[in-house]
Image: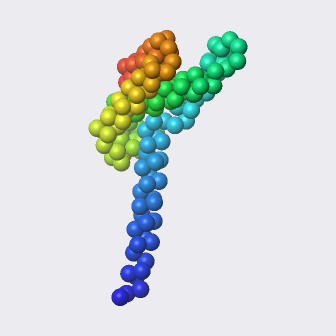
Amino acid sequence: MKSTDYQQPAADAATAQIAEHGRLSDFSQLIKTRLTFLVLVTTGVGFYVGTRGPVDLVRLFNVLVGAALAAAGASALNQWWERDLDALMSRTRMRPVPAGRMRAGSALILGCFMALIGIVYLALTTNFLATLLTALTVVIYILAYTR
């Protein structure tokens, strides 16, 4: 047995760890984590300003979860839709889809799933107005802002 035989499992584990970090980073870029966080901040502030009396923390949690899923889904759909243009611009060409680190179909499925789950979650845990406004925001972001 060669001495390098003992190093192979450690090298495989390191490669797997790097690949996993890369996938997490790509997912974070796909859902535009910083933008989604800003959406949650403004949503939380709006919730607080619109609250009469003590803040209902359970309802706030439900609003933030639904908004986070919908915003992340909209961001993924935006990147799926603009993948060809993103590949041409230096600022965006290294995003996961145009760079080829993520399949376009995967971004589409993930974006649809997250946006839909967020909207359904809001419908089940909040009210009609919050659900409607979130659904409209997702549609407007995709159809008006994108391209």
The residue at the far right in this view is: 53
Q: Is residue 85 visible?
A: no
Q: Nearer the viewer, residue 128 or 69?
A: 128
The residue at the far left in this view is: 105
124 on left or right of 112: right
Q: Nearer the viewer, residue 42 or 29?
A: 42
| Residue 2, percent from left and from top | 37, 87
46 on left or right of 91: right
Compared to residue 26, the image places residue 55 above or below, namely: above
Question: Which quadrant of the view contains residue 104?
Answer: top left
The colour scheme used here is rainbow
Compared to residue 65, the image places residue 52 above or below, namely: above
Q: Quadrant of the C terminus?
A: top left
Q: Residue at x 41, y 23 (%)?
A: 120
| Residue 85, percent from left and from top | 35, 33
Q: Quadrant of the N terminus?
A: bottom left
Q: Residue at x 59, y 25 (%)?
A: 58
| Residue 12, percent from left and from top | 40, 68
Compared to residue 19, the image places residue 80 above or below, namely: above
Q: Residue at x 36, y 36 (%)?
A: 110
27 on left or right of 44: left
Q: Is residue 46 visible?
A: yes
Question: Which quadrant of the view contains residue 13?
Answer: bottom left
Q: Residue at x 68, y 11 (%)?
A: 52
| Residue 100, percent from left and from top | 33, 46
